[in-house]
Amino acid sequence: MPTFPYVIINAFTRTSLGGNPAAIVLLPPGSLAPNRPTSTPILDDPTMIALTKSFAQPITVFLSSSPPQTQGDDAPAFDVRYFSNDFEPLVCGHGTLAATKAICRGLLPGLKKDVAWDPVVKFRTASGAMVSARALPPFSSSTAAADDEEDGEYYELELPTNTVEELTGSHRDCIRAAIAKSLRKDTTDLGLKYVARGAGKMSDYLMVVLDETEKLQDRDIDINALIGPFNANILTHLTPNEDSAFVSRVFDPLNGIMEDHVCGTAHTLLTPYYATIASSGVRAGQEVYVRQVGPRGGDLWVTLDDAKGVVRLKGNSRLFSTGEVRL
């Protein structure tokens, strides 16, 4: 009977009931390598999808250690697959952050525990893209819990920067109507500033910038009104006179994710956009604090690195449960 260890970790939070949960399943070394024999997979796609549905978490991450990608590279390297129900995203920010904690803290049997601070962990996605992440030293802050040493550290990952393309005319009008319905308002009363979709491979992401008077936090939203052609619907607004630069909420009912509690990928669109808005306080090379303000909440520190063409996402992660899958 094959068995595989797993953990469930809440990303971008310090609490057991906050942030965005991810199930992390460790497979034997080389199981997900692109050059492995396809006739004998450890877990085939239908089985991984069935396990994902059994976990019933926003994302399930399957990990398998692989040799370093370049000679002389000592960074731990892992092949990774992400599943959310039947959907396999190219990359998942919160799932990667959670997996980084599992690796760096040795939370899965067979992984080294308590690695040296500032390690880099490299993930190779199914498309062949490389994602880098690392653990950071514990952050000294008045908000840190004195009795929470295990979860007092921060993790950081880098994701490629993405741009947006403004939607105007009839496209904007249709989206205005859907957003107004979701916020239970008349279209004429909706404080709408900007509507755009992601460019290129991010074209299935919709970004809607609202006036700050719309107040997304604690807002009762009709998520079914957002079912449409986009995989992800990002609602956001600035938060003047608050600690955070901006807030957001993300919905993906098309793929069965009614609310994406903390979406790292969304911030690869949000951060570069807000860097173009002088009043946002977001500047290239400067770390800023932002929040997702759904019922579970999430805290992120984001940095736009123009030189590298990446957005760095930093946050805490909290171990929620551990176990073993038996098939």
Image: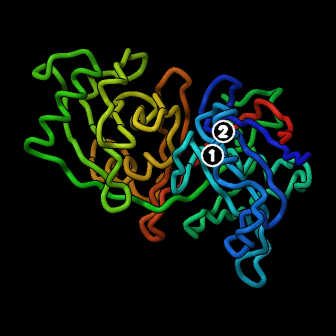
Residue in front for this viewpoint, 127 or 37:
37
Marks 2/1 in contact by CB < 8 Å: the verdict is yes
Residue 29 location, quadrant: bottom right
Cα separation, mark 2 vs mark 1, equals 6 Å
Image-based side of 230 in relation to 146, left or right: left
Q: Which residue is mark 1?
A: 95
Please determine whether, in this image, residue 284 is positioned above or below residue 291.
below
- At label 2, the amino acid type is Ala
In the image, residue 60 lies at what x, y percent?
65, 43
Q: Is residue 251 visible?
A: no
> On the rendered structure, is 289 left or right of 41?
left
Residue 124 or residue 192, whichever sits in front: 124
Q: Give how far across and how far down residue 122 sits, in percent.
A: 68, 65
Which amino acid, by three-letter code, is at mark 1?
A: Gly
The secondary structure type at the circle numbered 1 is: helix
* Residue at the image point whose x is 91% and y is 49% from the top: 109
Q: Position of residue 316 (x, y in %)?
A: 66, 39
- Quickly name the residue at label 2: 22
The residue at 54%/50% (across/down) is 88
Asked whether the viewer can see residue 94, the reply is yes
